[in-house]
């Protein structure tokens, strides 16, 4: 009666692509650290080949807790407490921020779909670095279940749902 004695359902968190492109499982990322899920489980997005710049958006609403000084990655903690890392491209830390511009300051509240970093996609490609962008849940103990919908994705699409541990 009145729900007493029932266990609460763990929170489910929907994630959106950081930009339009092709969603792939994180296990298919051409980098052994990400594909082996050493950083966390999740998905990645491959931008269109003809993209000249990318506005990389928050995949969830929450607080921007980390914005790397090289701007190649950022982390958002959702209202449910899920920590989500967006790593823009592979080996892009080596660019030392060249071709990246912050659009939001660390510590700010962001909404899902809000641009966080603008990337000169042409410059990154010319440097020989792929723009496949992993989006991973870095706190593995938070994730009870994760489902990814691979394929083409547009802003606002739900491409991953995480059921958090109670």
Image (cartoon, helix red, strand yellow):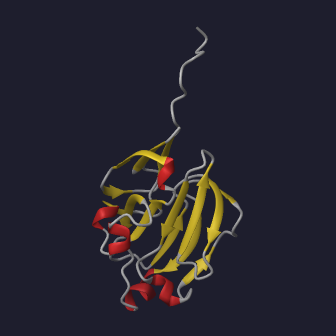
Residue drawn where x is 64% and y is 62% of the image: 64
Considering only vertical position in the picture, is 112 above or below 98? Answer: above
What percent of the width, then of the height, locates residue 135?
A: 45, 62
Q: Can residue 46 be seen in this view?
A: no
What percent of the width, then of the height, locates residue 52?
A: 43, 80
Residue drawn where x is 45% and y is 64% of the image: 19
Q: Is residue 87 visible?
A: yes
Considering only vertical position in the picture, is 92 above or below 127? Answer: above
What percent of the width, then of the height, locates residue 147?
A: 36, 47
Residue drawn where x is 56% and y is 54% of the image: 112
Outermost residue to the bottom = 127
What percent of the width, then of the height, locates residue 71?
A: 58, 78
Q: Is 23 or 120 nearer to us in this picture?
A: 23
Q: Is 143 or 52 nearer to us in this picture?
A: 143
Q: In this view, does 151 lie to the left or right of 53?
A: left
Image quarter in which the N terminus is found: top right
């Amino acid at each position: 009666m009145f729900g007493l004695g029932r266990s609460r359902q763990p929170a489910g968190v929907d994630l959106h692509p950081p930009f339009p492109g092709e969603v792939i499982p994180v296990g298919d990322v051409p980098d052994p650290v990400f594909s082996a899920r050493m950083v966390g489980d999740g998905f990645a997005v491959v931008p269109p080949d003809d993209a000249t710049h990318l506005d990389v958006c928050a995949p969830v609403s929450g607080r921007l807790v980390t914005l790397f000084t090289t701007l190649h990655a950022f982390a958002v903690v959702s209202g449910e407490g899920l920590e989500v890392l967006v790593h823009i491209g592979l080996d892009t830390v080596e660019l030392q921020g060249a071709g990246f511009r912050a659009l939001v300051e660390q510590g700010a509240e962001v909404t899902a779909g809000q641009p966080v970093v603008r990337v000169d996609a042409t410059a990154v490609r010319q440097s020989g670095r792929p723009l496949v962008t992993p989006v991973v849940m870095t706190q593995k103990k938070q994730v009870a279940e994760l489902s990814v919908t691979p394929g083409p994705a547009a802003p606002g699409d739900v491409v991953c749902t995480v059921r958090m541990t109670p």
